[in-house]
Image (spheres, rainbow, N blue to C red):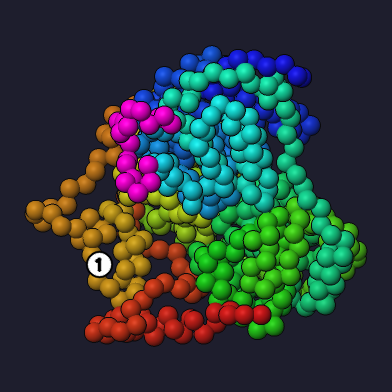
């Protein structure tokens, strides 16, 4: 194609997005599957009409808050295993800056998100415009520059011709498994409306493939040799196993060679819980079974994980001083961490290559049997913690009820607060995937917005949101969006009267309960006003009910499943009953104190530090 077509920047942008395709299971699907939009004076005059004209091909969803609609876009990408991308578009000023938290979530979790925000006029003739933040030392700065540390790609489109170069680059960054993350384009209001003769080739349909970098044969043989020499090898399954669609390769390697598998939070549900080699979730909010296996392992094969401190117990779970760390990762930065033997490659390709290279080799049977036995002991703990009682239920009881009632295809969503730990510790994965705990950025307020994004990505299946009262109050407006858009959610609100898990951390570190539970907050009287979540959810258009306890959960959940609109189940949970895991976590504590409780906490934390891995 050598011709051109005259379009505005906004028209060309919308047409480019609609022209992109992604190869999924041999089919060419739209790469950009949804736009989440709140229009304002920075994007409504030029961009809304082109989006309307293509809305049958690229659906546009109206969010209620820029942060939460972008969180929905992040969850949409995760539900699609990074193979489809959603767009978030906002006005200038506060509309744009409200996206910053969502950008942090996408960046930390290595998830694609395209953000398009309005900006001040490039001509500067009407400066300062409405919502423009002026910088006296640099007039070229706007709030949009604040995104630079939070994205993988950033640009400000100052001329129409620039769009021809920058949009393909943004797509390339988001689709590259190594650089995958959010991209941000600042769109000055006057530039959006400028016309230009755009090349037809720029607007032509293009089918993308996500690359699968192949492992170097020499490195595969090196890692295989290390495995053959090991007596206690262990695989850590990270989120990259899901994104590389490597769950089958993981199962083949573990089964054929008798290598136990433990899972990070992002890597949960990569192996069925019933699998004999699944030793459970690893780390601070994991299982004693997985942590015990990690403590004895002499070789750890970390696959598709950035080895966050909650997974490694701040690098205290590995107790063998001669343990060898091997990292299979598509990204150089993650593969090279902590003196690892780095095998940079696509996870599926690397695991299959290792499986072939190992031939008939198997790890010692006693090691595999130990994993099975320890996992069985952990499952007994889970059964005890999740058993319904007549008392005010714990988080674990609610998690157990959802786990029992889950159906194939249902996706469970939670984030931040106490629920990620309780879900991670007590979830017995009955299916591969369909499990979204946002704990990379640990973003309160992710839950309901993410559930909406998951439901848009997977409209034929239930999106089940587990959210605490604190997160619900922080960001709940997309519950209304789910009703408005006809994308039904099942939301379980666990009300423990405040930020109870942080109160627990506060107390466990020798501090006094303060400003976390509602009863410890400054208020005019002794009575604690409690939120009526049923009436609030009903006011947002959802159906809602409050149940007395775990014994009423099954019937309420059945009603929620039968409902044709979003359904909210509210239940009071005990703020003092928690699942426990014997794993150290490093937090900042005062070196000196006048409190005996503080001093005791520091002594105990220092005892845990003795196991912290500091080098090779």
What residue does disc 1 label? 513
Q: In this picture, which residue range is highlighted in magenta? A: 121-139
| Chief SS of the magenta region | loop
Relative to residue 616, is residue 385 depicted above or below?
Answer: above
Locate residue 79 relative to residue 578 in the image: left or right: right
Q: Is residue 126 magenta?
A: yes
Relative to residue 166, is residue 361 depicted above or below?
Answer: below
Relative to residue 434, is residue 227 depicted above or below?
Answer: below
Q: Going 68% across and 17% down the picture, which residue do you hit?
A: 4
Quarter where residue 182 is shown: top right
- The quadrant in which the N terminus is found is top right
Locate residue 281 relative to residue 95 in the image: left or right: right
Quarter where residue 324 is shown: bottom right
- Closer to the camera in the image, 586 or 272: 586
- Closer to the camera in the image, 278 or 91: 91
Q: Is residue 431 visible?
A: no
């Amino acid at each position: 194609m050598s011709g051109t077509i005259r379009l505005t920047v906004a028209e060309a942008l919308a047409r480019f997005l609609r022209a992109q395709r992604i190869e999924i299971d041999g089919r060419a699907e739209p790469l950009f599957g949804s736009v989440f939009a709140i229009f304002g004076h920075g994007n409504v005059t030029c961009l809304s009409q082109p989006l309307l004209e293509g809305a049958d091909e690229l659906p546009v969803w109206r969010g209620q808050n820029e942060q939460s609609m972008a969180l929905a876009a992040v969850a949409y990408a995760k539900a699609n295993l990074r193979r489809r991308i959603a767009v978030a578009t906002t006005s200038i000023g506060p509309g744009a800056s409200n996206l910053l938290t969502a950008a942090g979530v996408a960046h930390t979790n290595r998830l694609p998100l395209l953000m398009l925000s309005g900006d001040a006029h490039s001509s500067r003739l009407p400066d300062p415009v409405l919502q423009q933040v002026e910088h006296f030392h640099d007039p070229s700065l706007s709030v949009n520059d604040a995104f630079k540390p939070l994205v993988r790609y950033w640009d400000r489109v100052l001329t129409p011709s620039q769009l021809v170069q920058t949009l393909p680059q943004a797509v390339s960054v988001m689709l590259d498994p190594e650089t995958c993350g959010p991209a941000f384009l600042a769109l000055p209001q006057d530039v959006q409306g400028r016309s230009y003769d755009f090349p037809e080739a720029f607007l032509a349909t293009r089918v993308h493939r996500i690359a699968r970098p192949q492992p170097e044969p020499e490195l595969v043989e090196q890692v295989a040799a290390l495995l053959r020499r090991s007596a206690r090898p262990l695989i850590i399954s990270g989120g990259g196993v899901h994104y590389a669609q490597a769950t089958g390769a993981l199962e083949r390697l573990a089964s054929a060679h008798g290598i136990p598998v433990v899972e990070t939070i992002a890597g949960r549900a990569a192996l069925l819980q019933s699998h004999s080699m699944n030793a459970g979730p690893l780390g601070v909010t994991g299982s004693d079974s997985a942590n015990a296996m990690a403590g004895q392992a002499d070789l750890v094969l970390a696959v598709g994980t950035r080895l966050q401190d909650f997974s490694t117990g701040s690098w205290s779970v590995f107790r063998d001083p001669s343990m060898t760390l091997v990292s299979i990762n598509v990204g150089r930065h993650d593969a090279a961490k902590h003196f690892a033997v780095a095998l940079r490659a696509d996870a599926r390709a690397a695991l299959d290559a290792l499986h072939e290279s190992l031939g008939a080799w198997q790890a010692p049977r006693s090691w595999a049997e130990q994993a099975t036995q320890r996992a069985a002991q952990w499952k007994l703990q889970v059964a005890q913690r999740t058993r319904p009682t007549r008392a005010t239920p714990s988080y674990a009881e609610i998690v157990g009820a959802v786990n029992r009632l889950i159906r194939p295809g249902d996706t469970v969503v939670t984030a931040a607060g106490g629920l990620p730990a309780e879900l991670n510790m007590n979830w017995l994965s009955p299916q591969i995937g369909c499990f979204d705990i946002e704990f990379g950025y640990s973003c309160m307020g992710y839950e309901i917005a993410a559930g909406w994004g998951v439901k848009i990505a997977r409209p034929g299946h239930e999106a089940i949101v587990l959210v605490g009262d604190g997160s619900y109050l922080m960001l709940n407006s997309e519950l209304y969006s789910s009703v408005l858009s006809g994308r039904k959610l099942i939301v379980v609100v666990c009300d423990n009267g405040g930020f109870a898990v942080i109160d627990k951390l506060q107390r466990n570190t020798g501090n006094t309960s303060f400003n976390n539970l509602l009863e410890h907050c400054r208020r005019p009287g002794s009575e604690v006003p409690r939120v009526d979540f049923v009436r609030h959810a009903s006011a947002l258009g959802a159906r809602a009910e409050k149940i007395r306890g775990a014994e009423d959960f099954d019937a309420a959940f059945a009603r929620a499943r039968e409902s044709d609109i979003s359904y909210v189940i509210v239940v009071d949970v005990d703020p003092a009953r928690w699942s426990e895991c014997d794993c150290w976590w490093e937090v900042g504590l005062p070196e000196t104190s006048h409190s005996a409780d503080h001093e005791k906490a520091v002594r105990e934390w220092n005892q845990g530090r003795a196991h912290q891995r500091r080098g090779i």
